[in-house]
Amino acid sequence: MNILVAYFSHSGNTREIAGQIQAITGGDIFEIQSQKPYPKDYDAVVEQARIELDSGYIPVSKAKIKNIEKYETVIIGYPNWWATIPAPVKTFLSEYDFSGKSIAPFCTHEGSGLGRSVTDISKLCAGTKMLEGLEIRGSGVKNAQSKVSEWLRKIKLTK
Ligand SMILES: Cc1cc2nc3c(=O)[nH]c(=O)nc-3n(C[C@H](O)[C@H](O)[C@H](O)COP(=O)(O)O)c2cc1C
């Protein structure tokens, strides 16, 4: 099974979950990043993300995946930003053709769960099979192993 674990993380929570998923699935891992990094300051990034969302901004990606064709399943992770996907994830989803692939979304958040992110991902990925999503509290990522492995078992992505 060819699995790609692609994630965006600003403060590390989603990166932690992506690592756990990679360890269980044995998939390849890819960090989604923009050419221009986000400010570290929380209030500044919250404000920037709001402006980006309102204006429909699509940032330029820092790196590209070479052989996206070889993956059958893309597990995609992100923090919930204003109830949806951060702009760099929009860029990622717009850059490749995911038709015929399965997409398994996961997010970390502080209360809003997946928000409307799954609906928004579906809109950007025509012709894909959307698998059930996973949501994890950002403050609980270190203790999320059992929830993560249960989810992967349920959607049949364990090794
Ligand atoms: C710009 C921004 C917007 C956010 N919006 C939400 C939100 O709408 N709902 C929510 O539950 N958490 C929200 N959060 C909290 C993050 O989703 C949460 O802290 C997440 O675990 C951060 O993941 P990361 O460490 O991988 O960047 C927001 C955080 C940021 C920085």
Image (cartoon, rainbow, N blue to C red):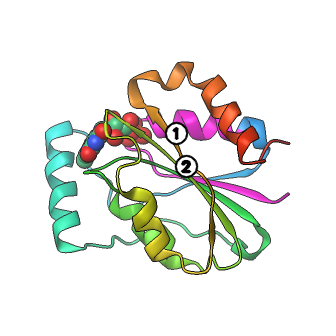
Of the 4 image quadrants, the one containing the N terminus is bottom right
View quadrant of ligand 1: top left
Q: Is the distance from the Cβ of mark 1 to the nearest ligand 1 atom less than 8 Å?
A: yes
Q: Looking at numbered disc 2 in the image, what kind of residue is underneath it?
A: Gly
Residue at mark 2 to residue at mark 1: CA–CA distance: 17 Å
Residue at the image position 17 percent from the left and 57 percent from the top: 50
Which of the two marks, 2 or 1, is nearer to us in this view?
2
Q: Where, quadrant-wise, is the C terminus in this rendering?
A: top right
Kind of residue at disc 1: Arg
Residue 89, image quadrant? bottom left
Disc assigned to residue 55: none
| Residue 9 lies in the magenta stretch | yes
Which residue is denoted by mark 2 in the rendering? 133
Mark linked to residue 15: 1
Region in magenta: 1-22
Q: Which numbered disc, 2 or 1, marks the residue that appears first in the sequence?
A: 1
